[in-house]
Amino acid sequence: MENIETLLQQFVDDREQLSDEQLDALCEAASADALLAARLKDQLIIDEYLAQQLAIDRRGFVAQVEQRIRDDQPGSPEPPAADPNIGMEMRDLLDVELAAQQRQAQRRGTQRWNWVVAGLILLLVAAGGGWWWMQFMQPVAVVEAVDGNPSLTREGRPAVIKAGTSLRPGDKIVTLPDESVSLRYRDGSELRLTGDTSAQLTPSTTNTGKHVTIAWGAILAEVVPQPAARPMQFKTPLSVATVRGTRLWLSADDERTRLDVMEGVVELKRSSDGETLPVRAREFAVATPDAFSVKPLTWPVDRRDAVVLLETVDRVSQVRTDDAGNWKPLELRPRGQARLDHDYALVLAGGSYGLHNASAPVLDSCQMTGELTIEVTITPTYAQHSQPTRIVTCSSKSDNYNFVLGQRDDRLFLRLRTDGADSSAGSEIELCRLVADQPQHLVVSYRDGDLVCYLDGRRVHHGGAVRGGFSNWERLAITLGDDQRGGRDWAGTLQGLAIYDRYIDDDEAQRNAELYRNLISSRPPVPQMEIHATLLEKSRIPAADEILPAKSALVVCRWQVDGVLTGQLVETEVMVVHWALLGGEPQPIATAEPGVQRQMLIERFGVNTQLEGVPRIDDFQDPEHRQARYYEASNP
Amino acid sequence: MTQSGQKLDFDAILRNTHARIRAYIAGMGIAAHEVDDVAQDVYLEFYKNIDKTPPDVAPQRWLKGIASNVCLNQMRRCASRGRVQREALAELLAATETETFRRTSEGTLQIALEECCRKLPDDSRRLLELKYQQDLTSDAIAQAVSKTAEAVRIALFRIRATLKNCVSKQVAGES
């Protein structure tokens, strides 16, 4: 037998480790020696306090008790009906059937059928038990992906969690910051736990659907349509969200629940008073003990630490001027052929926009934190750029920059200047592939030793080679679509730009991608037609000094439609509005002669409200030519 | 007392006593991973019968009584082996008073413990992190730090003893 000291250590280490004999010995020693008993108790108590203080999954105890009490209230789902009742019902049935059979057997003078019926009923009992097992014990979901080292607790014991792990009712998953777990239910519904989160697949007390209890943290859920009688429910310390099929993000702690709904409708009930609010697509709700409200969702989800925000020029376009959170309008200065499209997004082919008053705030803020995030939604015109081009850049020329986010070939790259000693700082880092003609939401985020890139919310790059802060940054201009001095022109459309002085995580990147995608899809569609046409007549082309102080002007031309390549157009002749001057420079239409043939993309001029106020020469005012105008949306 | 009044009282009691009641349950030798489940049962029982709490008994003392019963029931229900020994040990531990924990108020001990943890050498803090934060077994910790599991158990035992002494001194100093 080991000495008592060893037993003491083993018992504190794992209460279930000792054999009966070892426990006997420990009991005997503790009974005989009060000091030893006190030492053992001290060890157990210190062990417990340390666990309370350090173990993530030991937090939220108060919320767990409150949840238990709520579950225990009248009106809460009943305790498992199938477990005791099925057995009892089957036993009752067995008794009744046996009694009936006995009476029958007495009449017939035989009891052989008793055994047959009893056998059948036992089979039913077994089937009932099997059904119960199927409902309550079978895996309900499977882990699709694991990032980091999250923990799984099953029946109170730690269990291995990795891609492919089956999850059962009652399983509890805890993720720490920078960790995540993605899981999929049998019906295809998906959950993603991110950051500092504790969630439990609550054992459904009746067959009422999927239940998840979130003690704290955040989940992103894509729930396929659920049966009306068995909706999915997410319980938080303060509320219950009932979901019948939707995409949502839910974050919770003891003090607050926030629910963002991207699609569908979710019913959010505050547990304390039973108040229920419907939260619809593109809305979010916040429930606290004192407040409960629903508001429209805005992009980005968290504006803290944003220095530049440019959703589209007509909506949010501002720069933070101080740490107190004061903002002023962003001064955007177009150069070359840069212009706005019908969504007020920036069209950058052949030109650029300078963010005139953003340079100093970005420099000051990022130097202070040593962190930087650039979030932007781009639609590249070309799949390939053989030369490196500039999408978002803080530079004066190619070899003098703070940061450069650009496209070379079909790749997005970053060049970042840091004061770190590592040689890779400043080199061109390839981040992901880009495709032409499709909006792509990008987030590039850096902190010392971490560089990540998200494409449409998915992490596509994570590197640790770049180190250091930004103490060596210079006061250089921020330009969209080219270097400040030109020569690195990028062709495409840019919107949804946010520059932050902090690093952002998977969860926020994914939610912002989702929000911006929703924002784009909520805009009314603008039909476009690609036509092949011959110029018949054009309006007078204004001289540059004629339109001062404006530098750009539009002209209306009459075209004969030779063919419609895409879209629908019934007219055989169209009046198209073209850029005649952009940034003071004459555009190709200025020199085009009647009879010239062109292929162009056109759309209704009336939807292009961004062109209001731009000088327009229209020499076709006679009644014969007063039909609707189109606008050439392709590059001049 | 109204229902909401009861709830308010309960909330306050829960928040003010849970750390100590959980420690009390652990101090009876309940397995570490069962402590919170048992403690939840204790508070649920207390909540259901809050009216029955004698007015002259402090809620914490009443909760300890409930905890003792719930712990012993839990052992009777769950222990597949060593049930008798565990019960005996639990009763013995429940009856054992430790001066440090008796004298401290809720919150004081946690603060003292936090302070004492900060004073530990780096390698001790690392062991605590592996044991409690990462929830590793002594075998797994042994692999991580290239020691034997027994050496890890001894080291942790000593660290806890050091912390207990440190906490005692801090509490004594304050009192």
Image: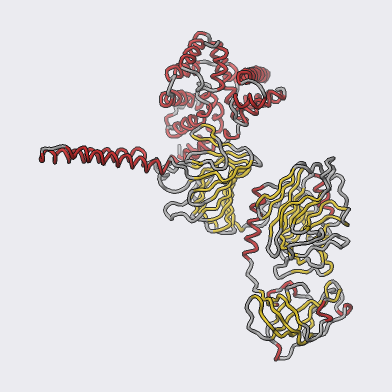
**Closer to us: A411 or A34:** A411
**Closer to us: A14 or B163:** A14
What quarter of the picture does the N terminus of chain B occupy?
top left
Image label count: 0
Measured as percent of width and height from the top left, residue A180 is found at 61, 43
Say if B29 sits above or below A163 in the image: above
Measured as percent of width and height from the top left, residue A623 is found at 70, 91
- Left or right for B108, reference A70: right
What quarter of the picture does the C terminus of chain B occupy?
top right
Q: Do we see residue B108 in this rendering? A: no
Q: Do we see residue A380 in this rendering? A: yes
Measured as percent of width and height from the top left, residue A202 is found at 48, 42
**Closer to us: A596 or B157:** A596
Residue at 50% of width from left, 27% of height from top?
B59
Say if A280 sits above or below A628 in the image: above
Q: How is the image coloured?
A: secondary structure
Measured as percent of width and height from the top left, residue A85 is found at 33, 40
- Left or right for B127, reference A131: right
Among the 4 quarters of the image, the one containing residue A610: bottom right
Residue at 55% of width from left, 39% of height from top?
A173
Say if A563 sits above or below B49 in the image: below
**Closer to us: A313 or A222:** A222
